[in-house]
Amino acid sequence: MKKYTIHFLIVTLVSGILGFTGLDFPGAFFVRLICLFAGIGLMISCLDAVIVSRKNRRIKKNSESKG
């Protein structure tokens, strides 16, 4: 999931700019919805990166203390 962080960030920024700048076009609601889902994906991706990095540090620390 870490490799998708930049993709989610770009989609969130672009759709946020298009959807929330006050432009009125037929697909504005769907662009805002895409922004919402991309933002949720970005949060999950960032949390996944933090959790996995902490887990890897813990595993590395345990293996060094045993060896």
Image (tube, helix red, strand yellow):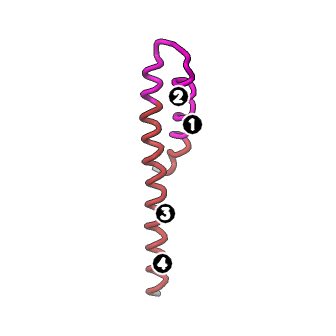
Mark positioned earlier in the residue sequence (1 or 4)? 1
Mark positioned earlier in the residue sequence (3 or 1)? 1
Magenta residues span 7-34
Residue type at mark 4 is Lys
- C-alpha gap between disc 1 and disc 2: 8 Å
Q: Is residue 63 above or below residue 26?
A: below
Q: Which residue is mark 1?
A: 10
- C-alpha gap between disc 4 and disc 2: 41 Å
| Magenta-colored segment: predominant secondary structure | helix
Residue type at mark 2 is Ser
Residue 15's label in the rendered image is 2
- Residue at 43% over, 20% down: 29
Are the residues at dot 4 and dot 2 in contact (C-beta closer than 8 Å)?
A: no
- C-alpha gap between disc 4 and disc 3: 12 Å
Q: Position of residue 26 (x, y in %)?
A: 46, 12
- Residue at 52% over, 35% down: 12
Are the residues at dot 4 and dot 3 in contact (C-beta closer than 8 Å)?
A: no
Closer to the camera: disc 4 or disc 2?
2
Q: Position of residue 9 (x, y in %)?
A: 54, 40
- C-alpha gap between disc 1 and disc 4: 35 Å
- Residue at 46% over, 16% down: 27
Mark positioned earlier in the residue sequence (4 or 2)? 2
Q: Nearer the viewer, residue 30 or 5?
A: 30
- C-alpha gap between disc 3 and disc 1: 23 Å
- C-alpha gap between disc 2 and disc 3: 29 Å
Mark positioned earlier in the residue sequence (1 or 2)? 1
Helix, strand or loop for disc 4: helix
Q: Which residue is mark 3?
A: 53
Q: Position of residue 47 (x, y in %)?
A: 45, 53
Q: Position of residue 4 (x, y in %)?
A: 50, 45
Q: Which residue is mark 4?
A: 61
